[in-house]
Image (cartoon, rainbow, N blue to C red):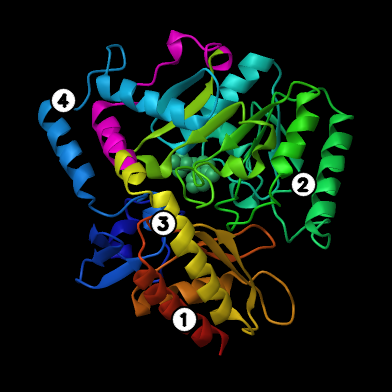
Amino acid sequence: MLARHRAVLPDWLALYYDDPLEITHGEGRRVWDAEGRAYLDFFGGILTTMTAHALPEVTEAVTEQAGRLLHSSTLYLNRPMVELAERIARLSGIPDARVFFTTSGTEANDTALLLATTHRGGNQILAMRNSYHGRSFSTVSVTGNRGWSPTSLSPLQTLYVHGGVRHHGPYAHLDDEAFTAACVADLRDLLGHVRAPAALIAEPVQGVGGFTSPPDGLYAAFREVLAEQGVLWIADEVQTGWGRTGDHFWGWQAHARNGPPDIVTFAKGLGNGMSVGGVIARAEIMNCLDAHSISTFGGTQITMAAALANLGHLLEHDLQGNARRVGALLLERLRTACAGLPGVKEVRGRGLMLGVELIRPGTGLAAPEAVAAVLEEAREGGLLLGKGGGHDTSALRIAPPLSLTAAEAEEGAAILERALRRVAG
Ligand code: PLP
């Protein structure tokens, strides 16, 4: 099949499996391939299936909206968009919040960077090492991962900060408190050498980088330093929002002792697979852009209808609570399964955002080839996983729909344990 498609697809298209997998339908936490084989989906699409595959409420809302109107342009009042913006503004915790919808996480971060640099002036941005913020020219230029490094003259000047990766880099050996103090001192030192940047952009838990996060409170400590120079804090919640991390509705809340970020971006799960992204910011920041900034496809009725139904289901069924409970079971189960396995460096995460970091035994070096092999073994066993990591990290990523049951967690963990043991042995 791959050979058949190569004539029309770019060579760099990253398909996960040696023998490409074609998913044809899904239900709940499972998907089926073109040959009718079922898989437990431990990656939720790509963290896009937030509640469940083929959630009836979303299907009904989309079908009903499609029968009436797909799109009327953002030049006219759009009731589902207003309703969703109201709900998100209330949920955001940001005072006097305004919401602007986009079609992807990349575009959401692009908009956030445009807002920050317009509001503050200058083109300097702080970003974290090992981060990922999207594929456009500006978002690639604030991504701290060699695989997506900026190609040439990005409009932004980016300075990279320590702290996003807990167990790699110069401060990895320190305990949490000393790690945080070292990263804060590093940031303070950096700001002493440069003109004040417009903003710091950071993922509360790094996604593509391998589901790794700093100690709780790091970004709150950063914020105190940033605030001295008026530097804005942009939280990229594309992977961490909507209760994914279990303990909190937003990932930034693990750092929240001094209030919400100035700007929050979101995408992925809100539409349960429909392309919905967006930016939340205080009115004074949002309103520095003018009407020329409208987006043709941001906030279309069809995507807003899907997102409203999906978010409603998530809140009514307390899927954040489910992520906390089932995530804790799964984390414990995986830690037990991996104890003593020589190729496993760490099992980490919170809620239903768990990472298993693999290394070459005896060396501590990243083992992307082992990650790929575990993915293949798990697929054979009927389990789909994600992978990630930076230049010195390699991890399996586990992010199932937030409705995962305890029985499914056990089923997936057993398949993963077998796959890890096969690859290790
Ligand atoms: N920000 C984060 C944290 C992401 O993980 C991603 C995608 O993986 C993006 C932004 C880009 O989102 P999209 O692929 O929807 O453009």
- Residue beneath disc 4: 69
Considering the whole magenta stretch, tell me its main secondary structure.
helix
Distance from mark 3 CB to nearest ligand 1 atom below 8 Å = no
- For the residues marked 1 and 4, what is the alpha-carbon distance in whole angstroms? 47 Å
Question: Secondary structure under badge 4?
Answer: loop
- Amino acid carrying label 4: it is Leu
Q: Say which mark, if any, is on residue 162.
A: 2
Q: In this view, does 360 lie above or below 148?
A: below
Name the residue rendered at 25%, 27% in the picture: 301
Q: Which of marks 2 and 3 is nearer the N terminus?
A: 2
Check disc 4: other Cα within 10 Å, few if <14, some if 14-19, many if 20+: few
Residue type indicated by callout 3: Asn
Report the magenta residues as a range: 284-311
Whether residue 137 sits left or right of residue 345 in the image: it is left
**Mark 2 touching mark 3, by CB under 8 A?**
no
The mark lying in front, picked from 1 and 3, is 3
Residue indicated by mark 1: 419
Provide residue 396's location: percent of width, then percent of height.
53, 66
Q: Is mark 1 on a helix, strand or loop?
A: helix
Q: Where is residue 312 in the image (x, y as percent from the top left)?
A: 31, 39
Could you tell me how far apart the alpha carbons at marks 1 and 2 are, in whole angstroms?
34 Å
Q: Is residue 286 one of those drawn in magenta?
A: yes
**First-in-chain label (4 vs 3):** 4
Q: In this view, does 177 lie above or below 220?
A: below
Q: Nearer the viewer, residue 291 or 354?
A: 354
Of callouts 1 and 2, the N-terminal one: 2
